[in-house]
Image (cartoon, grey):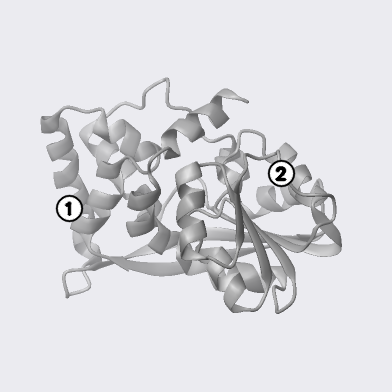
Amino acid sequence: MTTFDAYERELWAGRAEAYEQGFARLSGCTVERLLDAAGVRAGHRVLDVGTGPGPVAAAATRRGAQVSAVDAEPEMAETAARNVPGADVRVAVLPELPFDDASFDAVVGNFVINHVGEPVTALEALRRVLRPGGALALTCWTMPGSGVLALVREAMDEVGVPWPEDVPVSPFMEYGRPGAFGELMGRVLRDVSVEELDWEFEFEPEDWWRTGAMARVGSNGVVLTRQDPATIARVKDAYDRILRPYAAGNGTVRVPAHALLARGVR
């Protein structure tokens, strides 16, 4: 296991509840587009990789698919199994998948490929379990992070919080643009296409702060919660100031979100 993968296991351990309450609402905005890209329909055998609390698995189940789902974090897998009782949910860490070759008609992963240490190796594993002619669809955030994904980082930068040497940057950083993501997918799949997804995400700032940064969801939260109370308060002031132009007039804000959706065929 690479250093980044080990870091990811530690990062997400025990974060299922906080993630479900907060960040999963943002990542959930792409679920139906992801399933459409993979052509998921009734009767399909579908694998949802990095299922988290299970929103993709739940949506695929509603379409009538036969769903298997995996997550590297046991608490996430437990949450998904509870939320989607009809799915076969297991704990598995990419690139190791507990399924035979060509087991699925479609494989999907919602914002998971940017959380692995070796993206090409992970893609090869996903291709292995996909039947010939089946589709793999993956989302990732545009990188470097922007819009809603960058709020806390921008606030920390404004205050002058340094990035610690022991918090690694995602190896996927170089692939978070349409051309690079497409080139990566094209190494193991054919008929690859990449689509840019842009939308406005509405949320309550205090809730987002509590369930995201202060709950240590993501690397920004890890770095922030290491700071002393006075520094955290300064970052919070900067965060509030950055969000003011996005006020929606009802106690919420609407902030742009930017992601990529890639599709390829085995």
In the rendered structure, find residue 240 and report the number of the disc placed on it. 1
Residue nearest the viewer, comparing 198 with 217: 217
Left or right relative to 93: residue 252: left
| Whether residue 54 can be seen here | yes
Q: Residues within 10 Å of mark 2 (few under 14, many from 20)?
A: some
Q: Quadrant of residue 134?
A: bottom right
Q: Which residue corresponds to mark 2? A: 97
Residue nearest the viewer, comparing 134 with 237: 134
Q: Position of residue 226 (x, y in %)?
A: 26, 28
Q: Position of residue 59 (x, y in %)?
A: 55, 72
Relative to 234, say whether 246 is above or below.
below
Labels 2, 1: front one: 2
Q: Position of residue 179 (x, y in %)?
A: 68, 52
Amino acid type at mark 1: Asp
Q: Label 1 near label 2: C-beta < 8 Å?
A: no
Left or right relative to 130: residue 57: left
Q: Quadrant of residue 132?
A: bottom right
Q: Residue at x 50, y 57 (%)?
A: 80
Find numbered disc 1 in the image and state the secondary structure of the residue it sits on: helix
